[in-house]
Amino acid sequence: MSSRIEQIIEEIEEYIDRDCKFQPLSTTKIIVNKEHLDELLRELRMKTPDEIKRYQKIISNRDAILADAQAKADAMLDEAQVQTTELISEHEIMQQAYAQANEIVTAATAQAQEILDNATTDANTIRVGAVQYTDDLLANAESIIGHTLETYTTKYDGLVNSLKECYDVVRHNRTELDIPEMPVTDYESDQDLEEM
């Protein structure tokens, strides 16, 4: 949108080009209507301060807008810087936390492995001890049973021999008695069995 000053200047140019005529025998000088030109120039003078003020206001507003925009941009940059610093700090804290967590996990894994190794060693020692103890008990029981078996086998053999001798004597004595054997009826044998 053109300003009034620009319009007046255009009107002056049009007036010169269209309404003014060249002086006789000249191609550069023209004849003007002084009143009309004075009127246009007067209006131009009157509008100039208003236009200048308007431009100054626009410039001043523009400066204020630019200053405000610059202030907002600076604030945004400062905030971005703060957020970047916070993110970097958080990132460093996270890295430190990860590093510490890894150290803790490594230490815990090593400790757990050591406990497991110790428990395995202790269990193997206890197992070997238990097997040895059981073997000692079984060896002792084997010795006692073997000794008892040997002792009682000898005694049993002696007992069997003594009983055999007694049996032989009793049998021989009965044979010498030479008593005929009595026939036994079925009824008597059943009664004898019941009494037994």
Image (cartoon, helix red, strand yellow):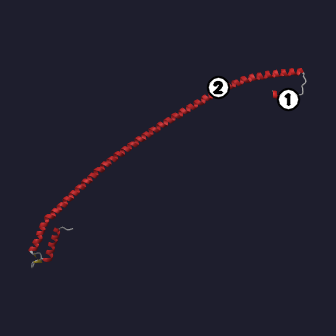
Q: What residue sits 52% from the left and 34% below the top?
A: 119
- Looking at the rendered structure, the kind of residue marked 1 is Ser
Q: Secondary structure at mark 2?
A: helix
Q: Please give left or right for residue 110 compared with residue 154 in the image.
A: left
**Residue under numbered circle 2:** 140
Q: x and y percent of residue 79 in the render?
A: 29, 50
Pointer 2 with pointer 1, Cβ within 8 A:
no
Q: Please give left or right for residue 52 compared with residue 97 in the image.
A: left
Name the one closer to the observer, 192 or 172: 192
Vertical order, 189 against 173 (above or below): below
Q: x and y percent of residue 99 in the render?
A: 40, 42
> Which image quadrant: the N terminus?
bottom left
**Residue under numbered circle 1:** 189
Vertical order, 149 against 80 (above or below): above
Q: Residue furthest bottom?
A: 24
Q: Secondary structure at mark 1?
A: helix
- Looking at the rendered structure, the kind of residue marked 2 is Asn
Vertical order, 172 against 37 (above or below): above
Q: Callout 2 environment at 10 Å: few (<14), some (14 to 19), or many (20+)?
A: few
Name the one closer to the observer, 151 or 42: 42
Which image quarter: residue 147?
A: top right
Q: Nearer the viewer, mark 2 or mark 1?
A: 1
Q: What residue sits 88% from the left and 29% below the top?
A: 185
Which callout, 2 or 1, points at the residue further toward the start of the chain? Answer: 2
Q: Callout 1 environment at 10 Å: few (<14), some (14 to 19), or many (20+)?
A: few
Vertical order, 48 against 95 (above or below): below
